[in-house]
Image: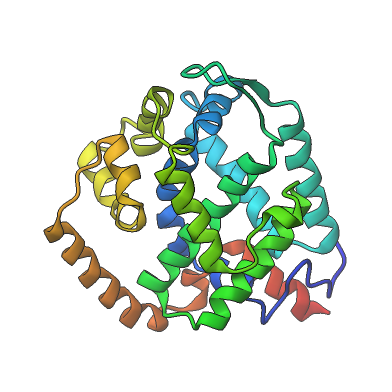
Amino acid sequence: MRQGDPGLFGPGSASWQVDREALLLAGGTCALLMQLAHPAVAAAVAQHSDFHGDPFGRLRRTLTASYAVVFGSTPRAARAIRRINAIHGVVNGRVPETGQAYHALDPKLLLWVHATLVDTALRVYERYVAPLSPAAAEAYHDEARRVAILLGVPADLLPSALIDLRGRMTEMLDGGDVRVTPTARLLAPSVLYPSRAIPRVLWDAAHLVSFSVMPAAIRAGYGISWSPARERGMERVGAVSRRLLPLVPGALRHVPHARTAERRLARA
């Protein structure tokens, strides 16, 4: 590891500002269930991973790779990207509901996964951490585009503006390209209730941040109940969180990978 190497982004970047917040992990359920709502993603996860048997392990590996790309040195980020591409390169099959062939390196499939991560991170950040200026949100989108290109999404397929990315997501939902299939519903309990040692009511409470930023069509597809009262309650939670979070020390508020990156640069 090269000391002083800021990696792909570095201090002052929108990616470091947003992704260092540990609270964003509360949106992980939203991103995962949105990804599984793409029939090909659900099929790939069901056919090529031990999702049912080890959901925590899959989440840990996903987070490790994501944080390596954002906060790691340039060589470490490159290794993580190569590893992700290598894994995707051998994932292929057919969607059980339609018989349609899929490949994990399909640019449109990669675009959906990319879009869910960007959209969820920004929604959780703005609702529960702090407001973002339009310029900062666009900067985060632009930086994420760089990673998406390295992961195989053609530059000309990536929307140039955040509003266009979200518009593309809406088109995919409204057009039926993204819909909750029976395969996705079979996988959902492993996301929602990954451990039987914890009562379901506690898991439901832990997922409220994710449910609050999830598109209504996705919630309905998984049978997740929501109401105006619950929405108002989460709006109050967001207001309290935005007010109190600045008082929390960075050692508790920021993910370890971000603090490690800061120390790496400080040593230089």
Q: Is residue 78 left or right of residue 251?
A: right
Q: Residue at 79% x, 78% y: name it.
A: 267
Q: Residue furthest left?
A: 229
Q: At which x and y percent is residue 144?
A: 65, 62
Displayed quadrant of residue 146: bottom right
Q: At which x and y percent is residue 207?
A: 32, 49
Q: Is residue 12 left or right of residue 186?
A: right
Q: Residue at 63% x, 42% y: name it.
A: 108
Q: Residue at 41% x, 36% y: name it.
A: 179
Q: Is residue 20 visible?
A: no
Q: At which x and y percent is residue 161?
A: 60, 69
**159 w.r.t. 50: above or below:** below
Q: Is residue 215 left or right of residue 48?
A: left
Along the viewing direction, whichever of 78 and 103 lies nearer the viewer: 103
Along the viewing direction, whichever of 187 and 6 lies nearer the viewer: 187
Looking at the rendered image, the quarter that the N terminus falls into is bottom right
Q: Is residue 7 left or right of residue 229?
A: right
**224 w.r.t. 155: above or below:** above
Q: Residue at 71% x, 34% y: name it.
A: 88
Looking at the rendered image, the quarter that the C terminus falls into is bottom right
Along the viewing direction, whichever of 93 and 255 lies nearer the viewer: 93
